[in-house]
Image (cartoon, helix red, strand yellow):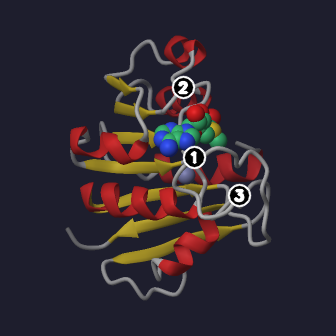
Amino acid sequence: MQEPEIKVLERVVRALPEHPTICEIGLARGETAAGIHELLGGRCTYYGIDKLLLDDARANMPWAARLWELDSILAHPEVPELDLLIIDGCHCESHVLLDFLHYGPKLRRGGYVFFHDLQREPQSQGMVGCPLAMDDQVGVYQALGKLQLLDGGLRGWRLLELMFDGLGAAVLQRLVT
Ligand SMILES: C[S@@+](CC[C@H](N)C(=O)[O-])C[C@H]1O[C@@H](n2cnc3c(N)ncnc32)[C@H](O)[C@@H]1O
Ligand SMILES: [Zn+2]
């Protein structure tokens, strides 16, 4: 993540209740997880999902309660109620839609969903080989639009942040359970 998104995520993490439960879809090297864990003084339960778990992620998250090396579309039945969900796995539109639809209902009232990599313009960097992808474009912004999350159309969710600096990010808050 870049500095602008890290600042947004830090604000969200500081607003979490005591000992929150967090799930990050897409861990890469586990650096964001390690940063959040440190910011919370280790007082959190962290779930991580990555279809390719790197040794670096395991090394950066020695405290992790649970890591799954799975496609995010397969891991959701294992994940409990959450205070924060970070959607940063496959950035194709299909995966982002499915990640929100599968994991969003797990958020407690007042919980947050953080979407990373919000590009308004078509962008294909790093988008290869997903069998669910309809094209080779990053589709995070498009998925948010289809979910009616950008204009408050989806009842029960409030858009708190929409930011295109750096790599871009959006934050939604769950209003009802
Ligand atoms: C942008 S990186 C995540 C960066 C990380 N959140 C951070 O802040 O450091 C995307 C990660 O998603 C993983 N990924 C890609 N497609 C996935 C899928 N369908 N299910 C789960 N993980 C996936 C990749 O292996 C990669 O590690
Ligand atoms: Zn995908």
Which residue is identified by label 2? Answer: 34
SS at mark 3? Answer: loop
Point out the frontmost of discs 1 and 3. 3
Q: Which residue is located at x 25 percent, y 55 percent? A: 106
Placement of 150 over or under 132, stated as above or below:
below
Q: Please, what is the three-letter code of the amino acid marked with disc 2?
A: Ala
Q: CA distance from mark 1 to mark 3?
A: 30 Å
Mark 1: amino acid: Glu
Q: Position of residue 105 (x, y in %)?
A: 26, 62
Question: Which residue position holds label 3?
Answer: 136
Category of crowding for the residue at label 2, using alpha-carbon neighbours closer than 10 angstroms: few (below 14), some (14–19), many (at least 20):
some
Say whether residue 141 is left or right of residue 81: right
Q: Are marks 1 and 3 in contact (CB under 8 Å)?
A: no
* Quarter of the image where ligand 1 sits: top right
Crowd band around label 3 with a 10 angstrom C-alpha radius: few (<14), some (14–19), many (20+): some
Across and down, in percent, residue 19 comes to 30, 36
Along the horizontal axis of the image, is 102 left or right of 30? left
Lower position in the chain sequence, tag 3 or tag 2: 2
Secondary element type, mark 2:
helix
Considering the numbered disc 1 on the image, is that residue within a helix, a strand or a loop?
helix
Query: Going from the N terminus, do you reach mark 1 or mark 2 first?
Result: 1
- First reached walking from the N terminus: tag 1 or tag 3: 1
Q: In the figure, is residue 119 to the left or right of 76?
A: right
Q: Which residue is mark 1?
A: 10
| Residue at left offset 60%, top offset 64% | 134
x 54%, y 25%: residue: 34
The quadrant in which the N terminus is found is top right
